[in-house]
Amino acid sequence: MTAEKRRDAQRIDDMLNAIREIEEEVGSLGRAEYEKDRTVQKAVTFDIMVLGDAASRVSQRTKKANPAVPWAELARYRNAEETGPAHGYFGFDLAGTWTFVRETVPDLGRKLRRVRVAPEDQE
């Protein structure tokens, strides 16, 4: 299935799967351990890119129906020119990513589990 044909419910599932992956990858690591483990950093980076990409592709009708989810912020974080995971490969912000993983991800997971996809006829 192409990305264009994916429905909002599938994108929400993609986001929840990425959150689950992040939580498993980081697990009980402390910040110092995380900053030393390039493999975990790369895995988390990929999952953050999935979160941001999926969030940017959710329909406007579902975004409007679920304003508690920071849709635009997720896409901006993914694409930040200097520090985001998609474009900040020369100056990736490990401290910012750590904060995102520990503070934003758990709350985001709770919000996404409550999302209700708006019907297509609500454009």
Image: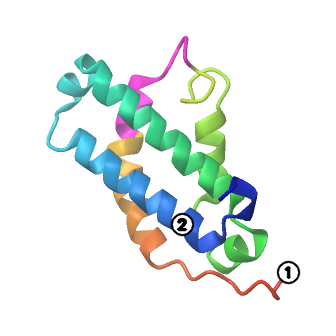
Q: Which mark is residue 12?
A: 2
Residue 4: x and y, percent? 75, 58
Check the image and tell me how it is coloured: rainbow
Q: Residue furthest right?
A: 123
Residue 26 or 14: which is nearer the viewer?
Answer: 14
**Where 5 falls versus 92 (above or below)?**
below
Q: Residue at x 72, y 75 (%)?
A: 64
Residue drawn at (81%, 86%), measured in percent from left and top?
122
Q: Earlier in the sequence, mark 2 or mark 1?
A: 2
Whether residue 33 sits left or right of residue 19 in the image: it is left
Residue at screen point 62% across, 76% down:
66
Local secondary structure at mark 1: loop
* Location of residue 116 (image quadrant): bottom right
Q: Which residues are magenta?
A: 89-99
Q: How many marks?
A: 2
What residue sits right under mark 1 in the picture?
123
Query: Measured along the vertical axis of the image, is residue 116 above or below residue 96?
Result: below
Dots 2 and 1: beta carbons under 8 Å?
no
Q: Is residue 85 magenta?
A: no
Name the residue nearer the viewer: 9 or 55: 9
Residue 21 image offset from top left, x and y in percent: 33, 49
Residue 36 image point, x, y percent: 24, 17
116, 81: nearer the viewer: 116
Q: In terms of depth relative to the viewer, which is nearer, 112 or 2?
A: 2
Amino acid type at circle 1 is Glu
Spatial CA span between label 2 and label 1: 18 Å
Find residue 38 and report its horizontal and vertical position in percent: 31, 19
